[in-house]
Structures are given as structure tokens and as C-alpha cells.
Amino acid sequence: MNENAIIIGGIFGFSAILLGAFGAHLLKKKLNLQQLQSFETGVKYQMYHAIVLLILGFQFPVTSTINNYIVYAFIIGTVLFSFSIYALVLLSANNKKLKFLGPITPLGGLFLALGWGLLVYKYMLI
């Protein structure tokens, strides 16, 4: 069992519910349709990977290096991907821009893809 994956997965799931409700109820009036859809994408990816982390946490022992790489790739990817989307949307809704955030989203996607790739690789070795 990987308790870190379970804890982070739980935190991601909990915060995805809160952020989803925040987006659906409070931000609906402040965001245009494209911004709202982007925010929802961040929430969806966060929740998907929260569930994956919970499943992996109950299945993966901490002792395996590849298991740890998979878990950390999903954690880093989710933070970079989803939270950069939240920041970009909220900043654009307030007519502000932080240019350095733009490349962070695809970098997060790359970490998510790496996590999935490592997961496939792990089970190809068996």
C-alpha cells in the first residue's frame, strides 16, 4: 500500500469536488463559456487522476521504484496541468495574464502521459 498516493488522491478528489462546485455556482456568472469549459477540464482531469491515485495507492507497494515514479508523475502532472488551468482561467477573467503559466499546462500533460506510459510499461514487464 502506498499511503502517499492515497492521501494525495483523497486531497485531489476532495478539492476537485470543491473546485467543481465553485466553478459551477460562483464562477458561472464571471466566466464566459470557453473559460468555464477550461475550468471544468481542469476539474475533470484532477478527479480522474485522484481516482487513479487512490486505486494505485491500494495496489502499489512503496518499495518499487517504478511504482513511485508512476505515482509522482501523476501527482506532478495533476498539479501542473489542472492548477495552471485554474490560474489561467481566473487570471483571464480578471483581465490579467502571467505568460509563464501558458507552458506549464502542457508540461503537466506531459507528466500525466508519462505516468500512463510508465504504468503500461510496468505491466508489459510482467
Image (tube, rainbow, N blue to C red):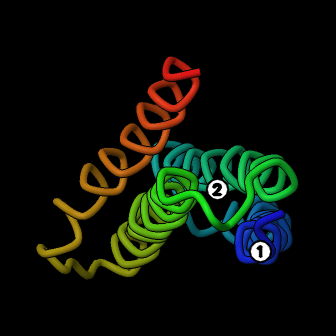
Instruction: Say left or right for 75 vs 77.
Output: right
Question: Of the residues shown, which amino acid type is indicated by label 1?
Answer: Ser
Q: Position of residue 55 (x, y in %)?
A: 83, 47
Instruction: Say left or right for 69 vs 13.
Output: left
Q: In whole angstroms, how far apart are the C-alphas of marks 1 and 2? A: 9 Å
Q: Position of residue 79 (x, y in %)?
A: 48, 69
Q: In the rendered image, which residue does mark 2 sit on?
A: 46
Say which quarter of the image contains residue 9.
Answer: bottom right
Q: Nearer the viewer, residue 53 or 106?
A: 53
Secondary structure beneath dot 1 equals helix
Locate the C terminus and report the quarter of the image it occupies. top right
How packed mark 2 is, by other alpha carbons closer than 10 Å (few <14, some 14-19, many 20 or more), is many
Locate the N terminus and report the quarter of the image it occupies. bottom right
Secondary structure beneath dot 2 equals helix
Q: Nearer the viewer, residue 61 or 56?
A: 61
Task: Find residue 15 and name its label.
Answer: 1
Q: Position of residue 72 (x, y in %)?
A: 50, 65
Q: Position of residue 69 (x, y in %)?
A: 45, 58
Residue located 44% across and 37% down the image? 118
